[in-house]
Image (tube, grey):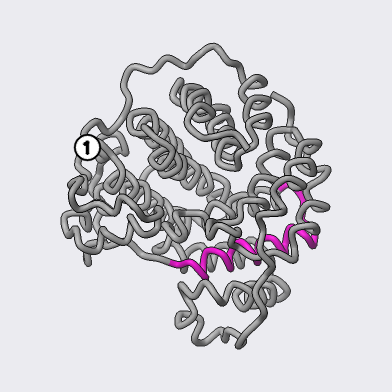
């Protein structure tokens, strides 16, 4: 696989600046995330051709409304229509303090809403943070303000036990303790966000957040989270809907892996707790009786072939998922990553 190259990222972010967080079909705008993922894969040449095809699906950035004030920001959480106001708010924050300081403060504040917009908010922040760590430029700072705005504007919390506990379990042990929503109580017709909302009527789920051991080596914990959720993907992705759901079970802790080196330990561990909870929510709402795949055949494709296949496929989820799997495999190898990246292109229609 090629070395990362960010030669075209800033131009891409300038092109995307006029657009908001929604597509014409109501789903989330993935364009900035895909652009960064392609650069991380060492394929900056693929960014512009992909954006040319994707741009017709984008909607303009909403008009600005009332200014969000530092003293009462909580009242604007979860207000999708205030994305532009949130972006202006974070733009001011980033003019007044270094970006890592702003990221640390707000990743900590927004962590309980890790599942916002089916985790797209935190995933976008992860891509933005990694690009800024590579080079701090004005377009990348603006993208961080938009990414944080996406997280804040779509903020959503999942049910959690009142008492913050540390269950002492590794992810692979803990996942089998997560209760599954019965089939007759699931939201089979709605999107991922609507399905996660049904957990409010499933009190058995609330204790899941406290099962995980968030102490010990943080990098190892993130590696275990992404690997376990890759195995959950392999065991449970059975159609387009569940494939997309379980893709986010991997790409969201992978985003945490991009954020954690740029923030303080306390913030990173809080985010890990809620990354786990968000993944549990996806498993509870979309999973089957078998939590994780055990015996894995990684397939014959190598890294370069998987990258070329994802680019040729064209779907935003396939590209981002392939990048996340290959990146996490490079950091902590597992056959689950190659198997998952090999599997995904057969589950989602080509663009």
Name above or below for residue 232 compared with residue 335. below
Residue 80 coordinates in the image, percent (x, y): 52, 72
Q: Is residue 229 left or right of residue 128?
A: left
Q: Which residue lies most toward the top here?
A: 300
Q: Is residue 44 left or right of residue 160?
A: right
Residue 138 lies in magenta, yes or no?
Answer: yes
Task: Say which quadrant the N terminus sits in.
Answer: top right
Taking the spot 44% from the left edge, 54% from the top edge, the residue there is: 118
Residue 79 coordinates in the image, percent (x, y): 49, 75
Taking the spot 38% from the left edge, 40% from the top edge, the residue there is: 242
Residue 185 coordinates in the image, percent (x, y): 19, 53
Name above or below for residue 42 compared with residue 258. above
Q: Nearer the viewer, residue 97 or 196?
A: 196
Label 1: few (<14), some (14–19) or many (≥20) C-alpha neighbours in 10 Å: few
Q: Nearer the viewer, residue 260 or 79?
A: 79
Which residues are the magenta region?
Answer: 134-155
Task: Say which quadrant the C terminus sits in.
Answer: top right
Q: Which residue is mark 1?
A: 176
Name above or below for residue 278 compared with residue 331. below
Q: Nearer the viewer, residue 143 or 306?
A: 306
Taking the spot 73% from the left edge, 35% from the top edge, the residue there is: 4
Secondary element type, mark 1:
helix
- Residue 179 in view of the camera: no
Q: Main secondary structure of the magenta part?
A: helix
Name above or below for residue 348 compared with residue 58. above
Residue 314 coordinates in the image, percent (x, y): 65, 36
- Residue 101 in view of the camera: yes
Q: Nearer the viewer, residue 103 or 46?
A: 46
Q: Is residue 58 left or right of residue 52?
A: left
Q: How many marks?
A: 1
Residue 43 lies in magenta, yes or no?
Answer: no
């Amino acid at each position: 696989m090629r070395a990362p190259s960010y030669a075209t990222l800033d131009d891409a972010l300038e092109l995307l600046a006029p657009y908001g967080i929604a597509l014409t079909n109501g789903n989330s705008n993935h364009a900035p995330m895909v652009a960064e993922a392609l650069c991380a894969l060492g394929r900056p040449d693929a960014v512009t051709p992909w954006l040319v095809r994707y741009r017709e699906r984008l909607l303009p950035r909403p008009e600005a409304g009332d200014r969000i004030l530092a003293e009462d920001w909580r009242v604007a959480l979860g207000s999708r229509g205030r994305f532009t106001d949130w972006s202006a708010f974070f733009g001011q924050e980033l003019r007044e303090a270094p970006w890592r300081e702003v990221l640390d403060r707000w990743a900590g504040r927004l962590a309980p809403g890790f599942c916002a917009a089916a985790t797209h908010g935190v995933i976008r922040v992860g891509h933005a943070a990694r690009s800024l760590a590579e080079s701090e430029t004005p377009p990348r700072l603006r993208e961080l303000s938009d990414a944080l705005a996406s997280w804040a504007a779509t903020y959503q919390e999942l049910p959690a036990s009142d008492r913050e506990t540390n269950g002492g379990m590794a992810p692979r042990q803990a996942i089998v303790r997560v209760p599954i929503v019965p089939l007759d109580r699931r939201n089979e017709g709605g999107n991922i966000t609507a399905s996660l909302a049904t957990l409010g009527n499933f009190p058995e789920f609330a204790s899941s957040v406290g099962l995980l051991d968030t102490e010990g080596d943080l990098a190892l914990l993130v590696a275990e989270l992404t690997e376990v959720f890759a195995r959950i993907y392999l065991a449970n992705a059975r159609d387009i809907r569940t494939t997309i759901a379980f893709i986010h079970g991997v790409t969201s802790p992978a985003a945490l892996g991009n954020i954690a080196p740029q923030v303080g330990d306390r913030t990173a561990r809080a985010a890990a707790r809620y990354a786990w909870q968000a993944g549990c929510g996806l498993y509870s709402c979309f999973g089957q009786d078998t939590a994780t795949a055990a015996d894995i055949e990684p397939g014959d494709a190598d890294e370069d072939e998987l990258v070329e296949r994802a680019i040729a496929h064209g779907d935003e989820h396939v590209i981002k998922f392939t990048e996340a799997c290959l990146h996490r495999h490079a950091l902590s190898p597992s056959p689950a990553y190659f198997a998952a990246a090999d599997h995904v292109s057969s589950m989602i229609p080509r663009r």
